[in-house]
Image (cartoon, rainbow, N blue to C red):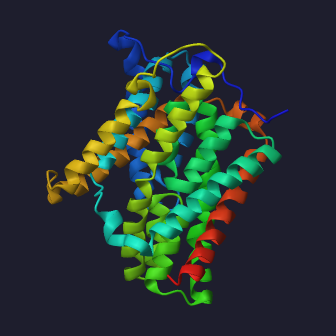
């Protein structure tokens, strides 16, 4: 028997948002927007926590109050949780450069790919041993192995994960992010890591960008700069991972059937992922002005916060409690695995 996160059919994260009157969408969207702005501001004061986690927490509290007051927030919150999130991921891509992978080169790719592979294998093995639900296991693995909230947000609509699973995955990786900001600089100094060595470790082993930044600059300016570049390169792993998940889910869904022919591309490649790639390509060729990067980064951060507030609005805290402690243990196992694998690969490769 597996640990599962119970969800009601009406709470599905990827369920299409059908055309509805504006008056039905407005309450949820408005509350999500207000909470997203508030969480973004608080997140700047508390970068270790980060705006996405704050938005989910505030959204959950607001959702409980709104339902008690008889407010209909479900339609708007689900629209924010899906489409605003996908739009934010596309905007986030406009701040990435595909040539960053080449610039970082062999100094990061072996460690980056090695930690991602180790995280994937451990998610499969430990997740089954701990009897964690498949969707939640995949979300925690993606968040830990790639880039926290952005990876969870990219994978969730592809697999149709419920709000409770998304919220629990966010909360799980948040625990390690907080610990990493404190522990990583101490361990780095004890091991005598260089600025680039620590930046490589932090960029490939810490989930959230804000926590990577905090830990990197706590070690030193050069370490912080390098950690951010590595983290952006690592974020590009969203593309192959989501494509792989999409293909595997399609094959699983059609296994045992007699349907012939290849599936439509739109079913294998989510449109927002293609737009994300196009945005990154546009930035690579210089079509995105450098002066616009700061504004784009802020817009993406705000969009993710608004989307996570929408997730929180539709989140039932009782469902998180029923999920049990096993997903949290899985998060700890995966986080430690990624951290130790990163150090081991640096030692082996001499990076």
Residue 305 image point, x, y percent: 42, 43
Instruction: Note whether 67 is above or below 57 in the view shown.
Output: above
Quarter of the picture containing the N terminus is: top right
Count the marks.
0
Q: Nearer the viewer, residue 33 or 135?
A: 135
Q: x, y percentage for residue 274?
A: 33, 37
**Given the current orientation, which residue lies at the most extreme right position?**
1
Q: Nearer the viewer, residue 250 or 64?
A: 250
Query: Can the viewer see residue 160 in this picture?
Result: no
Q: Is residue 27 above or below residue 184?
A: above
Q: Is residue 38 left or right of residue 110?
A: left
Q: Name the residue located 82 percent from the left edge and 47 percent from the top edge.
A: 129
Q: Residue at x 45, y 22 (%)?
A: 262
Image coordinates of residue 308 in percent, x first then y, are 48, 38
Tell me the residue at 53%/57% (across/down).
Answer: 49
Q: Is residue 193 visible?
A: yes
Specify the quadrant of the image occupied by residue 161: top right
When asked about the image quadrant of residue 136, the answer is top right
Q: Position of residue 115 (x, y in %)?
A: 58, 63
Looking at the image, which residue is at 63% across and 36% down? 165
Q: Nearer the viewer, residue 16 or 321?
A: 16
């Amino acid at each position: 028997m597996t640990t599962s996160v119970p969800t009601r059919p009406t709470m599905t994260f990827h369920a299409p948002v059908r055309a509805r009157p504006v008056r039905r969408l407005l309450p949820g969207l408005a509350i999500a927007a207000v909470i997203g702005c508030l969480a973004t501001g608080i997140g700047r004061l508390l970068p270790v926590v980060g705006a996405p986690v704050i938005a989910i927490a505030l959204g959950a509290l607001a959702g409980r109050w709104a339902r008690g007051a008889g407010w209909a927030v479900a339609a708007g919150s689900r629209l924010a949780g899906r489409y605003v999130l996908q739009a934010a991921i596309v905007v986030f891509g406009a701040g990435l450069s595909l040539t960053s992978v080449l610039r970082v080169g062999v100094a990061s790719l072996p460690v980056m790919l090695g930690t991602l592979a180790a995280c994937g294998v451990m998610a499969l093995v430990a997740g089954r041993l701990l009897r964690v639900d498949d969707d939640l296991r995949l979300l925690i693995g993606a968040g830990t192995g790639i880039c926290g909230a952005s990876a969870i947000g990219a994978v969730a609509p592809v697999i149709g994960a419920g709000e409770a699973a998304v919220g629990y995955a966010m909360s799980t990786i948040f625990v390690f992010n907080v610990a990493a900001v404190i522990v990583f600089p101490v361990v780095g100094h004890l091991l005598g890591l260089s600025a680039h060595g620590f930046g490589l470790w932090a960029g490939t082993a810490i989930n959230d960008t804000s926590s990577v930044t905090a830990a990197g600059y706590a070690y030193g300016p050069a370490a912080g700069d390098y950690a951010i570049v590595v983290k952006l390169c690592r974020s590009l792993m969203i593309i192959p991972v989501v494509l792989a998940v999409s293909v595997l889910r399609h094959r699983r869904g059609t296994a045992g059937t007699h349907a012939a022919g290849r599936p439509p591309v739109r079913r294998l490649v989510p449109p927002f992922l293609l737009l994300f790639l196009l945005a990154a390509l546009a930035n690579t060729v210089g079509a995105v002005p450098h002066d616009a990067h700061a504004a784009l980064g802020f817009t993406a951060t705000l969009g993710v916060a608004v989307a996570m507030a929408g997730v929180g609005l539709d989140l039932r805290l009782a469902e998180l409690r029923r999920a049990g402690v096993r997903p949290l243990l899985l998060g700890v196992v995966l986080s430690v695995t990624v951290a130790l694998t990163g150090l081991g690969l640096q030692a082996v490769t001499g990076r």
